[in-house]
Every structure is written in C-alpha cells, then in structure tokens.
Image: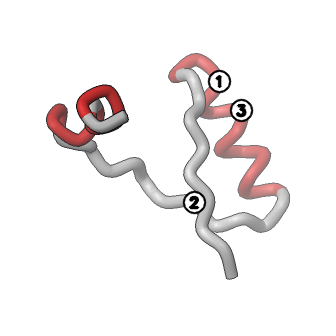
Amino acid sequence: MREVTVRIPDDKYEFFKELFEQLGLQTEPASEIPEEHKNWNKRNP
C-alpha cells in the first residue's frame, strides 16, 4: 500500500473528503507541520 499526501484548498476540502470516502480511500486528519519544517527546501536547495 502507498501513502499519498494531497494539498487541498480549505474551500474544496469537504468535496475531496467525500470523494475519497466514496472511492473507499482511507483519510486521516492533517497533522500540523512546524514552521521550521515548512521552509526547509528554501534553506536547503
């Protein structure tokens, strides 16, 4: 089994959540990413 992370705008979240459920895909609540990790690529090109 593969794990995929999808970035979805807040205003489209409910639509995609329902779509994934209808497709039988497991969803999990998003975990909060610390600020220092969000900008890691900018510091380490």
Q: Earlier in the sequence, mark 1 or mark 2?
A: 1
Image position of 6 (left or right of 33):
right
Q: How crowded is mark 2: few (under 14 residues within 10 Å), some or many (20 or more)?
A: few
> Residue under circle 2?
27
Q: Name the residue under label 1.
A: 12
At 65% from the left and 44% from the top, the residue drawn is 17
- Type of the residue with mark 3: Phe
Q: How far apart are marks 3 and 1 (CA)?
A: 5 Å
Residue at the disc numbered 3: 15
Residue 21 spot, x, y in % from top left: 73, 57
Residue 16 in percent (x, y) is at 70, 38
What is the crowding at mark 3: few (fewer than 14 residues within 10 Å), some, or many (at least 20)? few
Residue 9: which quarter of the image?
A: top right
Which residue in the rendered view is the most extreme toward the front? 45
Question: From the image, which quarter does the N terminus lie in?
Answer: bottom right
Kind of element beneath mark 2: loop
